[in-house]
Image (cartoon, helix red, strand yellow):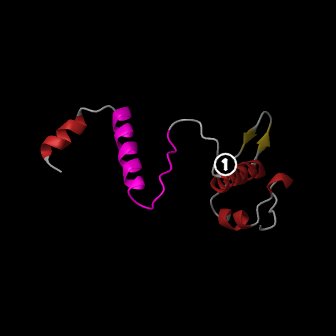
Amino acid sequence: MDIVKLREYETLSPFEIKDFLAKAASQAASASAIAYLNAGRGNPNWIATEPREAFFLLGQFAITESKRVLDLPPGVGGMPQARGCSRRGRRPRLPPAFAARPAA
């Protein structure tokens, strides 16, 4: 890529860059067998459930750890020690909603 072309890109706004990249990806996908998933800034009609569940599970573990140390109203928890955290994380005491479900 030459310097003149790079200078043109410097003048683009973030939205113009996004549009350019989306168009380039779409064209590349149509020229090959690779699918292009546009997960842009809109509200998709799907979510990636496994990463979201893992994120919420990690958050629930953090809250459980905090309450294990100190649990005061209104929602004030303590700062758990790092030592032993991974051991407790292998067998977290989580609410029933987070119980392991059978593999599909």
Out of 61 and 12, give the one closest to the viewer: 12
* Residue topped by disc 1: 79
- Kindly identify the amino acid type of the residue bearing the numbered disc 1: Met
Q: Residue at x 83, y 52 (%)?
A: 97
Does the magenta run of residues contain 24?
A: yes
| Lateral position of residue 4 relative to residue 95, left or right | left
Judged left or right of residue 55, residue 73 is right
Percent x, y of residue 38: 49, 45
Count of marks overlaid on the render: 1
Instruction: Determine whether, in the image, residue 5 is placed left or right of residue 31.
Output: left
Please name the predominant secondary structure of the magenta segment in the image: helix
Locate residue 76: give its quadrant: top right
Check the image and report above or below for 16 versus 103.
above
Residue 8 spot, x, y in % from top left: 20, 37
Q: Is residue 82 magenta?
A: no
Question: Eyeballing the image, is 18 above or below 80?
Answer: above
- Secondary structure of the residue carrying numbered label 1: loop
Characterize the local packing of mark 1: few (<14), some (14-19) or many (20 or more) Cα atoms within 10 angstroms: few
Q: Nearer the viewer, residue 17 or 61?
A: 17
The residue located at (18%, 51%) in the rendering is 1
Q: Quadrant of the C terminus?
A: bottom right
Residue name at image x 76 percent, y 48 percent: 67
Pinpoint residue 69: horizontal percent, then vertical percent.
Answer: 75, 51
Residue 46 x, y percent position in the rendering: 64, 45
Of all residues shown, which one is farthest toward the right? Answer: 96
Left or right for 94, reference 82: right
* Nearer to me, 104 or 62: 104
Residue 15 occupies quadrant: top left
Magenta range is 14-40
